[in-house]
Amino acid sequence: MSTIRLTAAQAMVRYIAAQMTEDGERFIDGIWAIFGHGNVAGLGEALEQAGNQLPTWRGQNEQTMAHTAIAYAKAKKRTRAMAVTSSIGPGATNLVTAAALAHVNRLPLLLIPGDVFANRAPDPVLQQIEDFDDGTVSANDCFRPISRYFDRISRPEHLLTALPRAFRVMTDPANCGPVTLSFCQDTQAEAFDYPESFFEPTVWRIRRPEPDSRDVADIAALIRSAARPVLVCGGGVVYSQAEETLGDFATRHGIPVIETQAGKSALAQSHLMNFGAAGVDGAESANSLAESADLVIGVGTRFQDFTTGSWALFKEPGRKLVSINVQAYDAGKHGATGVVGDAKVSLEKLSAALGAHQANAFDPQKRLDWLAKVDAHCRARTGVAEEYLPLDAEVIGAVQRTATDRTIAMCAAGTMPGALKLLWQAPQGGYHMEYGYSCMGYEIAGAMGVKLAQPDRDVVCFVGDGSYMMANSELATAVMRQVPFTVVLTDNRGFGCINRLQMGTGGQQFNNLYKDCNVEVQPDIDFVAHAASMGAHAVKAKDIADLEAQILASRDRAIPTVIVIDTDPMHGPGENGGGHWWDVAVPEISAQQDVNKARESYVAALQHQNLVD
Protein backbone atom coordinates (compact mmCIF):
# COMPACT_ATOMS: atom_id res chain seq x y z
CA MET A 1 0.00 0.00 0.00
CA SER A 2 1.51 3.33 -1.06
CA THR A 3 1.26 6.15 1.47
CA ILE A 4 1.80 9.88 1.64
CA ARG A 5 3.01 11.69 4.73
CA LEU A 6 0.87 14.68 5.62
CA THR A 7 -0.18 16.59 8.68
CA ALA A 8 -3.68 15.79 9.84
CA ALA A 9 -4.80 19.24 8.70
CA GLN A 10 -3.27 18.77 5.26
CA ALA A 11 -4.94 15.37 5.00
CA MET A 12 -8.34 16.77 5.98
CA VAL A 13 -8.13 19.52 3.37
CA ARG A 14 -7.00 17.13 0.65
CA TYR A 15 -9.79 14.67 1.44
CA ILE A 16 -12.50 17.35 1.51
CA ALA A 17 -11.34 18.71 -1.84
CA ALA A 18 -11.67 15.25 -3.42
CA GLN A 19 -15.33 14.64 -2.44
CA MET A 20 -17.48 15.23 -5.51
CA THR A 21 -21.11 15.47 -6.58
CA GLU A 22 -22.57 13.51 -9.48
CA ASP A 23 -22.25 16.70 -11.54
CA GLY A 24 -18.48 16.70 -11.12
CA GLU A 25 -18.34 19.55 -8.60
CA ARG A 26 -16.85 19.59 -5.10
CA PHE A 27 -19.53 18.73 -2.57
CA ILE A 28 -17.89 21.21 -0.17
CA ASP A 29 -17.61 24.30 -2.31
CA GLY A 30 -15.18 26.04 0.04
CA ILE A 31 -14.44 26.87 3.65
CA TRP A 32 -15.19 29.99 5.66
CA ALA A 33 -12.45 30.72 8.16
CA ILE A 34 -11.59 32.99 11.03
CA PHE A 35 -8.20 31.95 12.33
CA GLY A 36 -6.98 31.89 15.92
CA HIS A 37 -4.47 29.94 17.93
CA GLY A 38 -6.64 26.82 17.63
CA ASN A 39 -6.53 26.55 13.85
CA VAL A 40 -4.17 29.08 12.28
CA ALA A 41 -1.00 26.99 12.46
CA GLY A 42 -2.54 23.67 11.41
CA LEU A 43 -5.56 24.23 9.19
CA GLY A 44 -4.39 27.70 8.23
CA GLU A 45 -1.19 26.32 6.72
CA ALA A 46 -3.02 23.50 4.96
CA LEU A 47 -5.67 25.79 3.45
CA GLU A 48 -3.12 28.31 2.24
CA GLN A 49 -1.24 25.54 0.45
CA ALA A 50 -4.45 24.14 -1.06
CA GLY A 51 -5.36 27.43 -2.74
CA ASN A 52 -8.27 27.07 -5.15
CA GLN A 53 -8.41 23.32 -4.71
CA LEU A 54 -10.46 24.22 -1.61
CA PRO A 55 -11.06 27.98 -1.56
CA THR A 56 -10.93 29.81 1.77
CA TRP A 57 -13.09 32.85 2.49
CA ARG A 58 -12.75 35.20 5.41
CA GLY A 59 -15.87 36.41 7.20
CA GLN A 60 -16.51 38.72 10.13
CA ASN A 61 -18.19 36.44 12.66
CA GLU A 62 -18.19 32.68 13.06
CA GLN A 63 -21.95 32.41 13.47
CA THR A 64 -22.79 34.48 10.41
CA MET A 65 -20.15 32.72 8.29
CA ALA A 66 -21.98 29.52 9.11
CA HIS A 67 -25.32 31.16 8.29
CA THR A 68 -23.93 31.96 4.85
CA ALA A 69 -22.88 28.34 4.45
CA ILE A 70 -26.31 27.11 5.54
CA ALA A 71 -28.15 29.42 3.16
CA TYR A 72 -25.88 28.24 0.35
CA ALA A 73 -26.74 24.59 1.06
CA LYS A 74 -30.45 25.37 1.29
CA ALA A 75 -30.39 27.30 -1.99
CA LYS A 76 -28.54 24.37 -3.59
CA LYS A 77 -31.30 22.02 -2.38
CA ARG A 78 -28.75 20.13 -0.25
CA THR A 79 -26.76 19.01 -3.29
CA ARG A 80 -23.70 21.01 -2.20
CA ALA A 81 -22.47 22.50 1.06
CA MET A 82 -19.76 24.60 2.68
CA ALA A 83 -17.42 24.21 5.64
CA VAL A 84 -16.57 26.62 8.46
CA THR A 85 -13.52 26.58 10.72
CA SER A 86 -12.86 28.51 13.90
CA SER A 87 -10.40 28.66 16.75
CA ILE A 88 -11.19 27.14 20.12
CA GLY A 89 -13.19 28.86 22.85
CA PRO A 90 -15.41 31.78 21.77
CA GLY A 91 -14.71 31.16 18.09
CA ALA A 92 -16.06 27.64 18.45
CA THR A 93 -19.03 28.47 20.65
CA ASN A 94 -20.02 31.25 18.24
CA LEU A 95 -20.84 28.39 15.86
CA VAL A 96 -23.26 26.69 18.25
CA THR A 97 -26.31 28.73 17.22
CA ALA A 98 -25.62 28.06 13.56
CA ALA A 99 -25.22 24.34 14.23
CA ALA A 100 -28.61 24.30 15.93
CA LEU A 101 -30.11 26.16 12.98
CA ALA A 102 -28.73 23.63 10.49
CA HIS A 103 -29.88 20.75 12.71
CA VAL A 104 -33.47 21.99 12.94
CA ASN A 105 -33.60 22.69 9.19
CA ARG A 106 -31.96 19.36 8.24
CA LEU A 107 -29.23 21.08 6.21
CA PRO A 108 -25.66 19.93 5.51
CA LEU A 109 -22.91 21.96 7.18
CA LEU A 110 -19.34 20.93 7.99
CA LEU A 111 -18.03 22.60 11.14
CA ILE A 112 -14.34 22.30 12.03
CA PRO A 113 -13.76 24.13 15.30
CA GLY A 114 -10.33 23.98 16.84
CA ASP A 115 -10.07 22.19 20.17
CA VAL A 116 -7.71 21.91 23.12
CA PHE A 117 -4.40 20.03 23.02
CA ALA A 118 -4.94 16.29 22.78
CA ASN A 119 -1.66 15.73 24.65
CA ARG A 120 -2.80 18.08 27.47
CA ALA A 121 0.77 19.31 27.93
CA PRO A 122 0.00 23.04 28.10
CA ASP A 123 -3.32 22.67 29.95
CA PRO A 124 -5.14 24.89 30.55
CA VAL A 125 -4.47 26.50 27.20
CA LEU A 126 -5.85 29.96 26.42
CA GLN A 127 -9.69 29.89 26.11
CA GLN A 128 -9.94 26.33 27.45
CA ILE A 129 -13.04 25.34 29.40
CA GLU A 130 -12.10 23.10 32.34
CA ASP A 131 -14.60 20.62 33.76
CA PHE A 132 -13.68 19.80 37.34
CA ASP A 133 -15.21 16.32 37.07
CA ASP A 134 -14.42 15.24 33.51
CA GLY A 135 -11.02 15.67 31.88
CA THR A 136 -12.35 14.81 28.41
CA VAL A 137 -14.77 17.73 28.21
CA SER A 138 -14.11 20.88 26.19
CA ALA A 139 -16.33 23.74 25.05
CA ASN A 140 -16.91 21.81 21.83
CA ASP A 141 -19.02 19.26 23.67
CA CYS A 142 -21.76 21.89 23.29
CA PHE A 143 -22.05 20.66 19.70
CA ARG A 144 -23.00 17.10 20.60
CA PRO A 145 -26.81 17.52 20.87
CA ILE A 146 -26.98 19.80 17.82
CA SER A 147 -24.82 17.80 15.41
CA ARG A 148 -26.03 14.88 13.33
CA TYR A 149 -22.52 13.55 13.63
CA PHE A 150 -19.91 14.66 16.17
CA ASP A 151 -16.33 13.50 16.40
CA ARG A 152 -13.24 14.71 18.23
CA ILE A 153 -10.10 14.33 16.14
CA SER A 154 -7.39 13.70 18.73
CA ARG A 155 -5.18 11.46 16.58
CA PRO A 156 -4.26 11.95 12.91
CA GLU A 157 -5.55 8.52 11.91
CA HIS A 158 -9.01 9.36 13.26
CA LEU A 159 -9.63 11.10 9.93
CA LEU A 160 -9.68 7.75 8.14
CA THR A 161 -13.01 6.93 9.73
CA ALA A 162 -14.37 10.34 10.74
CA LEU A 163 -14.29 12.02 7.33
CA PRO A 164 -16.19 9.31 5.40
CA ARG A 165 -18.78 9.24 8.17
CA ALA A 166 -19.15 13.01 7.95
CA PHE A 167 -19.88 12.93 4.23
CA ARG A 168 -22.26 10.01 4.57
CA VAL A 169 -24.33 12.08 7.00
CA MET A 170 -24.31 15.26 4.92
CA THR A 171 -25.42 13.40 1.78
CA ASP A 172 -28.01 11.20 3.50
CA PRO A 173 -31.48 12.63 2.71
CA ALA A 174 -32.96 11.12 5.87
CA ASN A 175 -30.18 11.97 8.30
CA CYS A 176 -28.86 15.17 6.73
CA GLY A 177 -27.64 17.85 9.09
CA PRO A 178 -24.57 19.51 10.57
CA VAL A 179 -21.37 17.59 11.19
CA THR A 180 -18.88 18.78 13.79
CA LEU A 181 -15.29 17.56 13.61
CA SER A 182 -13.71 18.98 16.73
CA PHE A 183 -10.04 19.21 15.72
CA CYS A 184 -7.47 19.24 18.52
CA GLN A 185 -4.92 21.90 17.68
CA ASP A 186 -1.81 19.80 18.27
CA THR A 187 -3.31 16.94 16.25
CA GLN A 188 -3.79 19.28 13.29
CA ALA A 189 -0.01 19.70 13.09
CA GLU A 190 0.96 16.05 13.60
CA ALA A 191 2.10 14.00 10.58
CA PHE A 192 0.90 10.53 9.61
CA ASP A 193 1.44 8.16 6.68
CA TYR A 194 -1.98 8.16 5.02
CA PRO A 195 -2.93 5.67 2.28
CA GLU A 196 -2.87 7.47 -1.05
CA SER A 197 -6.13 5.74 -1.94
CA PHE A 198 -7.82 7.76 0.82
CA PHE A 199 -7.53 10.88 -1.33
CA GLU A 200 -8.89 9.47 -4.58
CA PRO A 201 -11.94 11.43 -5.77
CA THR A 202 -15.19 10.04 -4.42
CA VAL A 203 -18.63 10.72 -5.89
CA TRP A 204 -21.43 11.04 -3.33
CA ARG A 205 -24.84 10.11 -4.67
CA ILE A 206 -27.86 11.49 -2.83
CA ARG A 207 -30.13 8.48 -2.72
CA ARG A 208 -33.87 8.31 -3.41
CA PRO A 209 -35.23 5.68 -1.02
CA GLU A 210 -38.31 3.97 -2.43
CA PRO A 211 -41.41 3.54 -0.27
CA ASP A 212 -42.79 0.18 0.77
CA SER A 213 -45.46 -0.86 -1.73
CA ARG A 214 -47.78 -1.84 1.11
CA ASP A 215 -47.62 1.66 2.59
CA VAL A 216 -48.35 3.15 -0.83
CA ALA A 217 -51.39 0.90 -1.17
CA ASP A 218 -52.63 1.95 2.28
CA ILE A 219 -52.33 5.65 1.44
CA ALA A 220 -53.98 5.19 -1.94
CA ALA A 221 -56.94 3.54 -0.20
CA LEU A 222 -57.20 6.46 2.25
CA ILE A 223 -57.20 8.96 -0.60
CA ARG A 224 -59.87 7.09 -2.53
CA SER A 225 -62.13 7.06 0.51
CA ALA A 226 -61.54 10.72 1.41
CA ALA A 227 -64.11 13.35 0.55
CA ARG A 228 -61.93 16.43 1.12
CA PRO A 229 -58.20 15.61 1.01
CA VAL A 230 -55.52 18.31 1.09
CA LEU A 231 -51.75 18.17 0.42
CA VAL A 232 -49.32 19.97 2.76
CA CYS A 233 -46.14 20.85 0.86
CA GLY A 234 -42.98 20.87 3.00
CA GLY A 235 -39.31 21.49 2.39
CA GLY A 236 -38.72 17.85 1.54
CA VAL A 237 -40.48 18.48 -1.78
CA VAL A 238 -37.78 21.03 -2.64
CA TYR A 239 -34.85 18.90 -1.47
CA SER A 240 -36.20 15.95 -3.44
CA GLN A 241 -36.59 18.27 -6.46
CA ALA A 242 -40.16 17.01 -6.65
CA GLU A 243 -41.75 20.37 -7.42
CA GLU A 244 -43.08 19.38 -10.84
CA THR A 245 -44.09 15.96 -9.55
CA LEU A 246 -46.17 17.51 -6.76
CA GLY A 247 -47.85 19.90 -9.17
CA ASP A 248 -48.68 17.09 -11.57
CA PHE A 249 -49.96 14.87 -8.74
CA ALA A 250 -52.21 17.60 -7.36
CA THR A 251 -53.62 18.43 -10.78
CA ARG A 252 -54.14 14.85 -11.90
CA HIS A 253 -55.90 13.76 -8.71
CA GLY A 254 -57.70 17.00 -7.89
CA ILE A 255 -56.12 17.54 -4.47
CA PRO A 256 -55.31 21.16 -3.53
CA VAL A 257 -51.92 22.11 -2.09
CA ILE A 258 -51.21 24.28 0.95
CA GLU A 259 -47.71 25.40 1.91
CA THR A 260 -45.31 25.41 4.86
CA GLN A 261 -42.54 27.97 5.23
CA ALA A 262 -39.96 25.52 3.86
CA GLY A 263 -42.26 24.32 1.09
CA LYS A 264 -43.41 27.72 -0.14
CA SER A 265 -42.50 28.33 -3.81
CA ALA A 266 -42.14 24.62 -4.60
CA LEU A 267 -45.20 25.49 -6.65
CA ALA A 268 -45.45 29.00 -8.04
CA GLN A 269 -48.23 31.03 -6.44
CA SER A 270 -49.77 31.14 -9.93
CA HIS A 271 -50.17 27.35 -10.00
CA LEU A 272 -53.88 26.59 -10.08
CA MET A 273 -53.59 23.99 -7.29
CA ASN A 274 -51.61 26.23 -4.93
CA PHE A 275 -53.99 27.61 -2.30
CA GLY A 276 -51.27 29.38 -0.34
CA ALA A 277 -49.77 29.32 3.12
CA ALA A 278 -51.11 27.12 5.90
CA GLY A 279 -51.37 27.62 9.64
CA VAL A 280 -50.61 30.43 12.05
CA ASP A 281 -49.25 32.59 9.22
CA GLY A 282 -51.65 31.02 6.74
CA ALA A 283 -54.00 32.32 4.06
CA GLU A 284 -57.75 32.26 4.36
CA SER A 285 -57.91 30.06 1.26
CA ALA A 286 -55.49 27.50 2.66
CA ASN A 287 -56.73 27.41 6.23
CA SER A 288 -60.34 26.91 5.19
CA LEU A 289 -59.24 23.81 3.26
CA ALA A 290 -57.22 22.56 6.22
CA GLU A 291 -60.06 23.05 8.68
CA SER A 292 -62.52 21.02 6.61
CA ALA A 293 -60.11 18.35 5.33
CA ASP A 294 -60.94 14.78 6.27
CA LEU A 295 -57.50 13.63 5.04
CA VAL A 296 -54.35 15.70 5.53
CA ILE A 297 -51.41 14.47 3.42
CA GLY A 298 -48.06 15.89 4.45
CA VAL A 299 -45.29 15.65 1.84
CA GLY A 300 -41.80 16.33 3.16
CA THR A 301 -42.98 18.31 6.18
CA ARG A 302 -42.16 17.89 9.85
CA PHE A 303 -45.51 19.45 10.84
CA GLN A 304 -44.11 22.36 12.83
CA ASP A 305 -46.60 24.16 15.08
CA PHE A 306 -46.86 27.15 12.74
CA THR A 307 -48.03 24.81 9.98
CA THR A 308 -50.59 23.02 12.13
CA GLY A 309 -51.84 25.98 14.16
CA SER A 310 -50.37 24.19 17.19
CA TRP A 311 -52.45 21.17 16.10
CA ALA A 312 -55.73 23.08 16.28
CA LEU A 313 -56.01 23.81 12.54
CA PHE A 314 -57.31 20.43 11.33
CA LYS A 315 -60.77 20.60 12.87
CA GLU A 316 -62.76 18.01 10.92
CA PRO A 317 -63.97 15.25 13.29
CA GLY A 318 -62.36 11.94 12.46
CA ARG A 319 -59.87 13.46 10.06
CA LYS A 320 -56.90 11.28 9.21
CA LEU A 321 -53.25 12.24 8.88
CA VAL A 322 -50.76 10.92 6.31
CA SER A 323 -47.06 11.76 6.26
CA ILE A 324 -44.80 11.06 3.28
CA ASN A 325 -41.25 11.62 4.44
CA VAL A 326 -37.77 10.27 3.86
CA GLN A 327 -37.22 10.27 7.64
CA ALA A 328 -39.24 7.70 9.61
CA TYR A 329 -39.22 9.99 12.65
CA ASP A 330 -41.26 12.55 10.73
CA ALA A 331 -43.42 10.02 8.90
CA GLY A 332 -44.80 8.70 12.17
CA LYS A 333 -45.53 11.98 13.97
CA HIS A 334 -48.90 12.46 15.67
CA GLY A 335 -50.14 9.01 14.79
CA ALA A 336 -49.83 9.58 11.06
CA THR A 337 -50.07 6.77 8.57
CA GLY A 338 -46.56 7.01 7.22
CA VAL A 339 -44.85 6.43 3.92
CA VAL A 340 -41.09 6.37 4.39
CA GLY A 341 -39.46 7.32 1.12
CA ASP A 342 -38.21 10.03 -1.18
CA ALA A 343 -40.92 12.59 -1.93
CA LYS A 344 -40.57 12.42 -5.71
CA VAL A 345 -40.52 8.64 -5.94
CA SER A 346 -43.31 8.26 -3.39
CA LEU A 347 -45.61 10.67 -5.22
CA GLU A 348 -44.94 8.93 -8.52
CA LYS A 349 -45.76 5.51 -7.08
CA LEU A 350 -48.79 6.84 -5.24
CA SER A 351 -50.08 8.46 -8.43
CA ALA A 352 -49.70 5.18 -10.30
CA ALA A 353 -51.63 3.39 -7.54
CA LEU A 354 -54.44 5.96 -7.72
CA GLY A 355 -54.79 5.68 -11.48
CA ALA A 356 -57.47 8.05 -12.76
CA HIS A 357 -58.89 8.85 -9.31
CA GLN A 358 -59.80 12.50 -8.78
CA ALA A 359 -61.09 14.14 -5.62
CA ASN A 360 -61.93 17.68 -6.86
CA ALA A 361 -63.67 18.58 -3.59
CA PHE A 362 -62.58 22.22 -3.44
CA ASP A 363 -63.73 25.61 -4.68
CA PRO A 364 -61.14 27.17 -7.02
CA GLN A 365 -62.74 30.58 -6.53
CA LYS A 366 -61.48 30.72 -2.93
CA ARG A 367 -57.94 30.82 -4.23
CA LEU A 368 -58.74 33.71 -6.57
CA ASP A 369 -60.64 35.59 -3.86
CA TRP A 370 -57.68 35.33 -1.54
CA LEU A 371 -55.17 36.55 -4.13
CA ALA A 372 -57.42 39.55 -4.79
CA LYS A 373 -57.37 40.31 -1.07
CA VAL A 374 -53.57 40.07 -1.07
CA ASP A 375 -53.32 42.57 -3.91
CA ALA A 376 -55.59 44.98 -2.07
CA HIS A 377 -53.84 44.51 1.26
CA CYS A 378 -50.39 45.13 -0.24
CA ARG A 379 -51.39 48.20 -2.24
CA ALA A 380 -49.90 51.50 -1.10
CA ARG A 381 -52.52 53.55 0.68
CA THR A 382 -53.36 57.01 -0.54
CA GLY A 383 -54.81 60.09 1.15
CA VAL A 384 -53.10 59.37 4.48
CA ALA A 385 -51.64 61.87 6.90
CA GLU A 386 -48.14 63.17 6.32
CA GLU A 387 -46.82 61.41 9.41
CA TYR A 388 -48.28 58.08 8.25
CA LEU A 389 -45.88 55.10 8.41
CA PRO A 390 -46.22 52.26 5.88
CA LEU A 391 -47.32 48.80 6.92
CA ASP A 392 -45.13 45.76 6.30
CA ALA A 393 -47.73 44.56 3.80
CA GLU A 394 -47.22 47.72 1.75
CA VAL A 395 -43.46 47.15 1.78
CA ILE A 396 -44.01 43.61 0.51
CA GLY A 397 -46.33 44.99 -2.16
CA ALA A 398 -43.64 47.39 -3.35
CA VAL A 399 -41.12 44.58 -3.73
CA GLN A 400 -43.75 42.37 -5.38
CA ARG A 401 -44.52 44.96 -8.01
CA THR A 402 -40.84 45.21 -8.94
CA ALA A 403 -40.25 41.44 -8.86
CA THR A 404 -39.61 39.16 -11.81
CA ASP A 405 -39.56 35.39 -12.20
CA ARG A 406 -35.89 35.58 -11.13
CA THR A 407 -36.62 37.25 -7.77
CA ILE A 408 -36.04 35.40 -4.50
CA ALA A 409 -37.50 36.91 -1.34
CA MET A 410 -35.60 35.78 1.75
CA CYS A 411 -35.87 36.38 5.49
CA ALA A 412 -35.65 34.62 8.86
CA ALA A 413 -37.17 36.30 11.90
CA GLY A 414 -39.54 38.95 13.19
CA THR A 415 -42.68 40.15 11.45
CA MET A 416 -41.62 39.51 7.89
CA PRO A 417 -41.54 35.67 7.88
CA GLY A 418 -45.23 35.50 8.68
CA ALA A 419 -46.06 38.42 6.42
CA LEU A 420 -44.10 37.00 3.49
CA LYS A 421 -45.49 33.49 3.85
CA LEU A 422 -48.97 34.97 3.88
CA LEU A 423 -48.60 37.66 1.21
CA TRP A 424 -45.58 37.06 -1.04
CA GLN A 425 -46.68 35.69 -4.42
CA ALA A 426 -43.60 33.68 -5.29
CA PRO A 427 -42.51 32.32 -8.62
CA GLN A 428 -41.25 28.76 -8.43
CA GLY A 429 -38.10 28.80 -6.29
CA GLY A 430 -38.68 32.43 -5.40
CA TYR A 431 -38.77 32.10 -1.63
CA HIS A 432 -36.03 31.35 0.92
CA MET A 433 -37.05 31.38 4.56
CA GLU A 434 -35.15 30.14 7.59
CA TYR A 435 -38.07 29.46 9.89
CA GLY A 436 -37.16 26.17 11.48
CA TYR A 437 -35.05 28.07 14.00
CA SER A 438 -36.29 31.57 13.09
CA CYS A 439 -32.85 32.89 13.90
CA MET A 440 -32.41 36.64 14.12
CA GLY A 441 -29.21 37.64 12.36
CA TYR A 442 -29.48 35.04 9.60
CA GLU A 443 -30.80 37.46 7.02
CA ILE A 444 -27.82 39.37 5.61
CA ALA A 445 -25.40 36.45 5.83
CA GLY A 446 -28.09 34.22 4.38
CA ALA A 447 -28.70 36.60 1.48
CA MET A 448 -25.03 36.36 0.60
CA GLY A 449 -25.21 32.56 0.72
CA VAL A 450 -28.28 32.48 -1.54
CA LYS A 451 -26.65 34.79 -4.06
CA LEU A 452 -23.44 32.72 -4.08
CA ALA A 453 -25.52 29.60 -4.74
CA GLN A 454 -27.76 31.20 -7.36
CA PRO A 455 -25.85 34.11 -8.89
CA ASP A 456 -28.35 34.49 -11.72
CA ARG A 457 -31.23 35.21 -9.31
CA ASP A 458 -32.28 38.59 -7.93
CA VAL A 459 -32.07 38.23 -4.13
CA VAL A 460 -34.11 40.58 -1.94
CA CYS A 461 -33.42 40.31 1.79
CA PHE A 462 -36.13 41.52 4.18
CA VAL A 463 -34.73 42.38 7.61
CA GLY A 464 -36.08 44.33 10.57
CA ASP A 465 -34.03 46.83 12.51
CA GLY A 466 -33.81 44.49 15.51
CA SER A 467 -32.41 41.61 13.48
CA TYR A 468 -30.06 43.94 11.59
CA MET A 469 -28.64 45.15 14.90
CA MET A 470 -27.93 41.57 15.96
CA ALA A 471 -25.80 40.62 12.95
CA ASN A 472 -24.93 42.83 10.03
CA SER A 473 -21.17 42.51 9.59
CA GLU A 474 -21.24 40.09 6.66
CA LEU A 475 -22.47 43.07 4.66
CA ALA A 476 -18.80 44.08 4.61
CA THR A 477 -17.87 40.60 3.38
CA ALA A 478 -20.40 40.84 0.56
CA VAL A 479 -18.90 44.19 -0.44
CA MET A 480 -15.38 42.72 -0.33
CA ARG A 481 -16.42 39.76 -2.48
CA GLN A 482 -18.68 41.84 -4.76
CA VAL A 483 -21.79 39.79 -4.03
CA PRO A 484 -24.80 41.95 -4.94
CA PHE A 485 -28.20 41.65 -3.31
CA THR A 486 -30.84 44.07 -2.07
CA VAL A 487 -31.62 44.56 1.63
CA VAL A 488 -34.99 46.08 2.53
CA LEU A 489 -34.52 47.21 6.13
CA THR A 490 -37.83 47.96 7.84
CA ASP A 491 -37.23 50.20 10.85
CA ASN A 492 -40.03 50.01 13.43
CA ARG A 493 -37.71 51.08 16.26
CA GLY A 494 -37.57 47.85 18.20
CA PHE A 495 -38.95 44.33 18.21
CA GLY A 496 -42.37 45.06 16.72
CA CYS A 497 -43.39 41.43 16.13
CA ILE A 498 -42.87 40.35 19.73
CA ASN A 499 -44.40 43.58 20.98
CA ARG A 500 -47.63 42.62 19.22
CA LEU A 501 -47.43 39.09 20.61
CA GLN A 502 -46.93 40.56 24.09
CA MET A 503 -50.05 42.69 23.66
CA GLY A 504 -51.98 39.79 22.12
CA THR A 505 -51.41 37.69 25.24
CA GLY A 506 -52.70 40.48 27.49
CA GLY A 507 -49.36 41.96 28.46
CA GLN A 508 -48.40 45.60 28.57
CA GLN A 509 -45.93 46.98 26.06
CA PHE A 510 -42.62 46.35 27.80
CA ASN A 511 -38.96 46.09 26.76
CA ASN A 512 -39.61 45.47 23.06
CA LEU A 513 -40.00 48.81 21.32
CA TYR A 514 -37.33 51.29 22.32
CA LYS A 515 -39.99 53.62 23.67
CA ASP A 516 -40.97 50.97 26.23
CA CYS A 517 -37.45 50.18 27.44
CA ASN A 518 -35.70 51.39 30.56
CA VAL A 519 -33.29 53.74 28.79
CA GLU A 520 -32.21 57.32 29.33
CA VAL A 521 -32.01 58.23 25.65
CA GLN A 522 -34.16 56.91 22.82
CA PRO A 523 -31.81 55.65 20.08
CA ASP A 524 -32.00 57.25 16.66
CA ILE A 525 -29.87 54.90 14.59
CA ASP A 526 -28.72 56.03 11.17
CA PHE A 527 -28.86 52.71 9.35
CA VAL A 528 -28.01 54.35 6.04
CA ALA A 529 -24.74 55.73 7.41
CA HIS A 530 -23.96 52.43 9.10
CA ALA A 531 -24.47 50.33 5.98
CA ALA A 532 -22.58 52.84 3.85
CA SER A 533 -19.63 52.69 6.26
CA MET A 534 -19.23 49.01 5.34
CA GLY A 535 -19.16 49.85 1.65
CA ALA A 536 -22.76 49.09 0.69
CA HIS A 537 -24.86 51.44 -1.39
CA ALA A 538 -27.33 52.74 1.21
CA VAL A 539 -30.37 54.98 0.89
CA LYS A 540 -33.51 55.83 2.84
CA ALA A 541 -36.79 55.48 0.98
CA LYS A 542 -39.11 58.43 1.49
CA ASP A 543 -42.24 56.39 0.86
CA ILE A 544 -43.53 53.27 -0.91
CA ALA A 545 -43.15 54.76 -4.38
CA ASP A 546 -39.55 55.69 -3.63
CA LEU A 547 -38.94 52.19 -2.27
CA GLU A 548 -40.03 50.71 -5.61
CA ALA A 549 -37.72 53.04 -7.50
CA GLN A 550 -34.76 52.24 -5.26
CA ILE A 551 -35.30 48.48 -5.63
CA LEU A 552 -35.28 48.77 -9.41
CA ALA A 553 -32.10 50.87 -9.30
CA SER A 554 -30.33 48.33 -7.09
CA ARG A 555 -30.28 45.62 -9.75
CA ASP A 556 -27.48 47.19 -11.76
CA ARG A 557 -24.98 47.32 -8.88
CA ALA A 558 -22.12 44.92 -8.18
CA ILE A 559 -22.35 45.45 -4.42
CA PRO A 560 -25.17 45.06 -1.88
CA THR A 561 -27.79 47.80 -1.66
CA VAL A 562 -29.45 48.63 1.65
CA ILE A 563 -32.78 50.46 1.45
CA VAL A 564 -34.10 51.69 4.80
CA ILE A 565 -37.77 52.52 5.29
CA ASP A 566 -39.61 53.48 8.48
CA THR A 567 -42.64 51.27 9.18
CA ASP A 568 -45.56 50.99 11.58
CA PRO A 569 -44.79 48.57 14.44
CA MET A 570 -48.38 48.09 15.58
CA HIS A 571 -50.08 46.19 12.76
CA GLY A 572 -49.44 42.58 11.74
CA PRO A 573 -49.88 40.91 8.37
CA GLY A 574 -52.93 38.77 9.10
CA GLU A 575 -55.50 41.52 9.46
CA ASN A 576 -57.16 40.91 6.12
CA GLY A 577 -58.25 37.30 6.22
CA GLY A 578 -55.14 35.37 7.23
CA GLY A 579 -53.70 33.73 10.29
CA HIS A 580 -54.67 31.19 12.91
CA TRP A 581 -54.35 30.66 16.65
CA TRP A 582 -50.89 29.82 17.98
CA ASP A 583 -50.22 28.15 21.32
CA VAL A 584 -48.34 30.73 23.38
CA ALA A 585 -48.93 30.02 27.06
CA VAL A 586 -50.69 32.84 28.94
CA PRO A 587 -50.18 33.22 32.73
CA GLU A 588 -52.80 31.34 34.71
CA ILE A 589 -53.10 34.16 37.25
CA SER A 590 -52.26 37.83 36.96
CA ALA A 591 -53.03 41.18 38.57
CA GLN A 592 -53.75 42.52 35.07
CA GLN A 593 -57.29 42.16 33.77
CA ASP A 594 -56.12 42.02 30.14
CA VAL A 595 -53.97 38.99 30.96
CA ASN A 596 -56.86 37.25 32.69
CA LYS A 597 -59.08 37.82 29.64
CA ALA A 598 -56.35 36.50 27.38
CA ARG A 599 -56.06 33.44 29.62
CA GLU A 600 -59.78 32.74 29.21
CA SER A 601 -59.42 32.86 25.44
CA TYR A 602 -56.32 30.70 25.63
CA VAL A 603 -58.04 27.97 27.66
CA ALA A 604 -60.95 27.97 25.24
CA ALA A 605 -58.61 27.63 22.26
CA LEU A 606 -56.80 24.68 23.86
CA GLN A 607 -59.98 22.64 23.50
CA HIS A 608 -59.47 22.56 19.73
CA GLN A 609 -56.04 20.95 19.89
CA ASN A 610 -55.91 17.43 18.53
CA LEU A 611 -52.45 16.25 19.53
CA VAL A 612 -52.68 12.51 18.88
CA ASP A 613 -55.06 10.60 16.64
Image (cartoon, grey):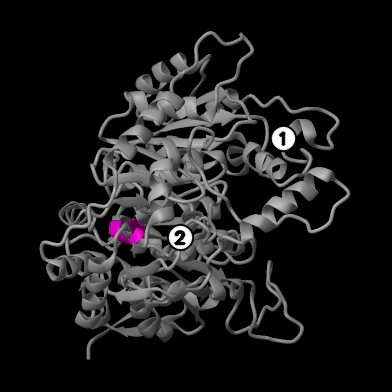
Residue 348 appears at what percent x and percent y? 16, 66
Residue at x-position 30% and y-position 76%: 340
In primary-sequence order, the first of circles 2 and 1 is 2
Q: How many marks?
A: 2
Is residue 118 rendered to the left or right of residue 57?
A: right
Residue at x-position 22% and y-position 58%: 242
Residue 18 seen in this snapshot: no
Q: Amino acid at mark 1?
A: Leu
The CA distance from mark 2 to mark 1 is: 35 Å
Q: For label 2, count other residues whose C-alpha is less than 10 Å away and answer few (under 14), some (14-19) or many (20+).
A: many
In this view of the protein, which residue sits in the foreground, 24 or 360?
360
**What mark, if any, has residue 513 been given in the picture?**
1
Tell me the residue that label 2 is attached to.
84
Q: Amino acid at mark 2?
A: Val
Residue 356 appears at what percent x and percent y? 11, 61
Residue 237 among magenta residues: yes
Where are the magenta residues, as a range?
A: 231-238
Tell me the quarter of the picture where residue 296 sits: bottom left
Q: For label 1, count other residues whose C-alpha is less than 10 Å away and answer few (under 14), some (14-19) or many (20+).
A: some
Tell me the quarter of the picture where residue 589 sits: bottom right
